[in-house]
Amino acid sequence: MRSKKLAILGMAGLTVMAAPTVAYASPDKSVTVTVMGTSDLHGNTLNWDYFNNAEYNDSRANDIGLAKVSTLVNKIRRERGADHTLLFDSGDTIQGTPLAYYYAKVEPVNETGELHPMARAMNAIGYDAVTLGNHEFNYGLPLLATWVKQMKAPVLGANAVYAKSGLPAYEPFTIKTMKVKGEKPIRVGVLGLTNPGVAIWDKGNVEGKLRFTDLVASAKKWVPVIRGRGADVVVVTAHAGDNGMSSYGSELPIENASAMVAEQVPGIDAVLFGHAHNEVAQKFVTNKVTGQQVLLTEPSRWGQRLSVIDFQLTKKRGKWTVTGKSSATLNTNTVGEDPKIVALMKKQHDTTVKYVNTVVAQSKEELLAAESPYKDTPILDYIHKVQTETVKKALEGTADAALPVLSIAAPFSRSATFPAGPISVRDMAGLYIYDNTLMAVKLTGAQLKDYLEYSARYFNQLAPDAPVDLSALTNASGTPDYNYDQFSGVTYDVDVAKPVGQRIAGLSYQGAPVAADQQFVVAINNYRQSGGGGFPHVTTAPVVYNAQVEIRQALIDYATATGVIDPAGFTEANWKLTRDGKPLF
């Protein structure tokens, strides 16, 4: 009933009115309103690294988590006056840490009735609006609906609409009213836009249920509605980067369209954006229709930064007008954790720590992922082993049971380690850091070759006599490690002296060259199969297995069942880098 009500209201131009707050005008009738913003929190409430079982630390001395954010927010509220400030978020909130995973999959809040940890923390801090990110859809619509209901702040997503009716599935926008002593109130509108890529990345959860419309078109529809409801300031919170590019093809609206929204839609004062995990303290874009400057800011990820936007409003001819704006990003490593949030999260945090430290197997050797982007390493072979056996077992008795089963895996984390001795859930989670599910598709030998050539774009071309500089060998054109797919089940070389598209040599199966029409079953994750990374053939390939088994859980279950991780049983050196046909290492 609630979703239907929202949909009906949405068509009328849904406005959610928050409780009024108070601001005070100076003698020249000017007021400053401060909007604070986070994005890409990804389940981080405390300054804690669950994979390393220690306080978070990185090479740049960043800190993470909502407890740190809360301290900065409280400081800004004290300095500017709580009645002068608002706090928004631009999405990717409920996925990304073992804490978020535990309360989505181990003890799902939509089944237990427990308050989601991110709702608990964000409600306590006092967010005014939160926008949906693409990762909000990872755990399915029922869990998302529970989190939305638990949030005190409205959860926005104007361009997430019902597949059949086209009506808004979530609240499109909200308006916050601030009283000004002796003056007309100031009204701040915020429009939430999510990422169209959800239709690809979480196809299994949203297909036939939701559509995701173009960010620019959606903003053109809703910004006039917000202005028509009397908003003096309009902020767009967008879960989309600002480079105008997409990681997928042209079948969906543009993925990273935040700057395009600012350029093409009149009436927007600022865009608080996310998705790209970058820090953008302040950036101005000129609106092509009005010539006005639109402010953009992005607060990095995981609660490492807080964006702070200041709007100066002046009373002109009886109406509040934005006469100035600026923004900055504040580093959360400059403050301590808010003890209120730490205390509030203690029970759920301790439960998660206990879970991730549960021992599931014993490893006979230490296995490291540090070299996995450029060498065939046993720790990735373990992923291949589990994926291959899971698919083979599922195909028993089917028409495809006789086909060779190959496996795809990528080096998600160079820091992943299986220590010699006890292996815990967090060791597995550190190796497979994404909540992907396992699928299998059928590819021909020719398609397999195309796929491998596409994957090999990851390497920079190496001159015949150039020294091997590992820091310059990988990540060509910004390709991330997770988009370098490696295969098991076939043997091949990647010749980094050759140009892109001509690098795969010696592709063979059981010692014989792979024929162009030869059929293979390929174990693959749902992100890749649905088009993530833009790899060829897989989105249209026949799907022969899709039991919605989480790969991370499959690794944990396999380790628990066998009780031992012995590289002698799964190590397969089946690919290598070469230069002009000679091994690089």
Image (cartoon, grey):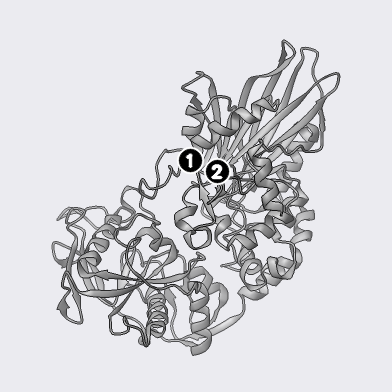
N-terminal-most mark, 1 or 2:
2
Residue 44 position by quadrant: bottom right
Q: On screen, 56 above or below 223? A: below
Instruction: Mark 1 and mark 2 in contact? Answer it, CB < 8 Å.
Output: yes
Q: How many marks?
A: 2
Where is mark 1, residue-wise? 214
**Which residue lies under the disc numbered 2?**
159
Image coords of residue 127 (percent x, y): 72, 45
Q: Nearer the viewer, residue 44 or 195?
A: 195
Q: Residue 562 placed where, x, y %?
A: 48, 89
> Which residue is drawn at the image coordinates 36% and 67% (left, top)?
372
Q: CA distance from mark 1 to mark 2?
A: 7 Å
Label 1 neighbour load within 10 Å: few <14, some 14-19, many 20+: many
Query: Which quadrant does the N terminus fall into?
Result: bottom right
Outermost residue on the front side: it is 165
Q: Secondary structure at mark 1?
A: loop
